[in-house]
Structures are given as C-alpha cells and as structure tokens.
Image: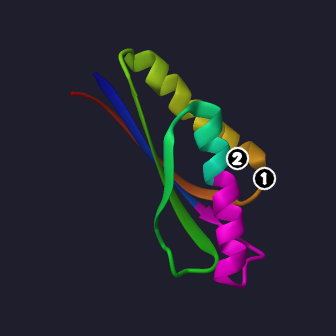
Amino acid sequence: MVVGIGKIVFRLHECHSLKAKRKIVKAITSRLGNSFNASVAEVDLNDVHQRAEVGFALVGNDRSVINSKIDKIFNMAEDLGLAEIIDTEMEIFNV
C-alpha cells in the first residue's frame, strides 16, 4: 500500500474575518477532495485570518499514480485562484 500526504499553505489577501476565511477554505477543500477522491482538511492556522494550511492524503497501490495525483492537486489548488500558495510539502511512503 502506498500513502501520499501533502500540505499546502495559502495566503488569503482579502480576508479580514474567520467567516470569510472559512468560505474560501471550504471551497478549496471541497473542490480538491471531490476532484481527486482525496481526504482534504484545514490542519493548522485555524485562528489566523490571512493564512490557511490545508492537508490531504491519498492511498493507492502504485507510487507513480499517487505522485502524479499529488502534483495535480498542487496544480489545481493554484489554478483555482482563490488564494496564493506560499508553501507546499509532500511525502510518499509504503506501508
């Protein structure tokens, strides 16, 4: 079994309340989760208005497929245009 995990840190320029942040984060997590059948959630920076940290996980049996999906998740997150990506991390391991 191959597990791929990733983290994306976003900068939310025009966010001045947690309600506005929640709207943007929910849009990002639902689109990424639905498009790639991945588990996606906000994992840190919950009380910071202008930053969001979203984590995701994928499970499969082919390392190259998981790597490709993670790259596509990063690309789609950027293409959504809802927030600026300031950092990304990924890790793939066999269990």
Q: Which residues are magenta?
A: 10-28
Q: Nearer the viewer, residue 29 or 91?
A: 29
Which quarter of the figure has residue 92? top left
Residue 1, percent across and down?
Answer: 28, 21
Give whichever of 60, 9 is nearer the camera.
60
Residue under the point 50% across and 55% down: 41
Colouring scheme applied when the structure was drawn: rainbow
Q: Farthest residue toward the left?
A: 95
- Residue at 44% of width from left, 17% of height from top? 64
- Residue at the disc numbered 2: 78
Magenta-span inclusion, residue 47: no
Mark 1 element type: loop
Label 1 is placed on what type of residue?
A: Gly
Asked whether the residues under the numbered discs 2 and 1 touch, taking CB atoms below 8 Å apart as contact, a structural biologist would say: yes
Up the image or down, 26 lies above or below 73; here it is below
Q: What's the residue at 74%, 73% (across, down)?
A: 13
Q: Is residue 7 left or right of residue 76?
A: left
Q: Is residue 15 left or right of residue 90?
A: right
Residue 16 horizontal/vertical position (percent): 72, 84
Position in image of residue 6 (x %, y %): 44, 44
Mark 2 residue type: Glu
Q: Quadrant of the C terminus?
A: top left
Q: Which mark is residue 81?
A: 1
* Residue at image coords 59%, 32%: 36
The image shows residue 53 at horizontal and vertical percentages of: 51, 62
Residue 26 placement: quadrant: bottom right
Helix, strand or loop under label 2:
helix
- Tell whether position 19 is magenta: yes
Q: Residue furthest bottom?
A: 16
How far, Cα to Cα, is label 2 from label 1?
Answer: 6 Å
